[in-house]
Amino acid sequence: MKNTHTASHLRSAMNERELQRLIRRVLRDASVQWQTNDGTAITVLSVGEWNHHDGPDFLNMALQAEGKILIGHGEVHWRSSDWEDHGHSAQPMYQGLLLHIVVQDNRLKTPFARHTLVIPEEILLPYTGKLPELAPTLQPREIDDILRDCAEQRFFRKAEFAGALLLEYGADAAWKRLGTEFCEKRLRTKHLPQGIKRLASLLHETVEEKNTGTVHQIKAAQSITAFIEECAGAEFPKIQESWALLLDEAPFGAGTTLEFVVNVLLPLGYARASGAHKQDVAQGLLRWYRTLKAVNRYARLQRKYSFVRQEYVWQQQGLLEYEAEIAAPNHHAEKTLHASSAHGSVDMVMTVFEA
């Protein structure tokens, strides 16, 4: 049944960007099962990345729907007819939209999105003015609940992007492209760990197909390639052994190696296993991610959130994702690059693995 509620109260009190923030808050509860306007039951596993630039509002959402886990982009409007009013029909970056989220559905058909979800004003109203803020007054378990959700959103987004690279370029080129992007972001920082320079050197040598790398670099590249290949076909204990060896050897230093594993290898391994329908391997990698101990503390995060533990990697990753969502920066080069990459193909609406 279509929602005919006018949404007049909320619309007079907030703009569309504030509506996006409110809807993100409502959809963060993965225990809620929603029903789209065509009767499909969906569960929002990850709200994805809030896009502050041109293109769909939520990048790389993860939905449990149609007996699968679907990854794709979401767009928010007050009314479904705003799609035409905003001119999205003529914009290629909106093709292949996974989810259209509206307060009022005033159209007979919505062919531009795979699913349309109507969230009436009466459901949104109780959440207004109650953003999930990290504060010293929260219990440790409450803080961890917020960070765990944020960390998993971050992980799934990275895994989906890695999966897109796998499909387009193959495993060997995918980890080098992801690794190069990882290094380039850090090479712009003032205080640069030596490990980043060693990793960047390895990527330069392998990408250029030169044979001048050190024995240490060649061994590291072989270990990385073996780990990614094993994710597609090996049993999880063997993958665990391979990964543990890489962390123990720490070819780029303990901190840099762990960051490289978390930001590149784990998401890529998860995508590789999912693409090969190795659900046990994919879930094993995700469980392992949740147990990784942090090597270093992020000083900037420590100054701002001194009451938050940085004992585990997922706590640090959750803080980074929390900041990206709550702070809602208006200008960020990384966000622009990611949004542009994500909109490159309608195939970004994809099945990660069969349920």
Image (cartoon, rainbow, N blue to C red):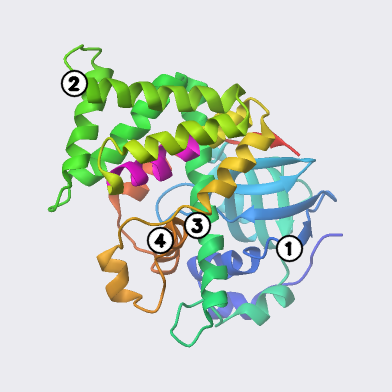
Name the kind of residue labelled 1 in the image: Ser
Mark 4 to mark 2 CA distance (whole Å): 32 Å
User: Magenta stretch?
Assistant: 256-268
Q: Quadrant of the C terminus?
A: top right
Q: Residue at x 33, y 24 (%)?
A: 221
Residue hosting label 2: 214
Residue 174 figure quarter: top left
Tag shown at residue 31: 1
Magenta run includes residue 68: no
Mark 3 to mark 4 CA distance (whole Å): 8 Å
Name the kind of residue labelled 3 in the image: Ala
Label 2 or label 1, whichever comes before in sequence order: 1
Q: Residue at x 80, y 53 (%)?
A: 37
Label 3 or label 1, whichever comes before in sequence order: 1
Tag shown at residue 316: 4
Name the kind of residue labelled 2 in the image: Thr
Label 1 or label 4, whichever comes before in sequence order: 1
Residue hosting label 3: 151
222 left or right, relative to 16:
left
Q: Is residue 154 above or below residue 242?
A: below
Tag shown at residue 336: none
SS for dot 3 = helix
Mark 3 to mark 1 CA distance (whole Å): 17 Å
SS for dot 2 = loop
Label 4 or label 2, whichever comes before in sequence order: 2
Mark 3 to mark 2 CA distance (whole Å): 35 Å
Q: Position of residue 318 (x, y in %)?
A: 46, 61
Q: Position of residue 199 (x, y in %)?
A: 24, 33
Mark 1 to mark 4 CA distance (whole Å): 24 Å
Q: Do the residues under discs 3 and 2 have CB atoms within 8 angstroms?
A: no
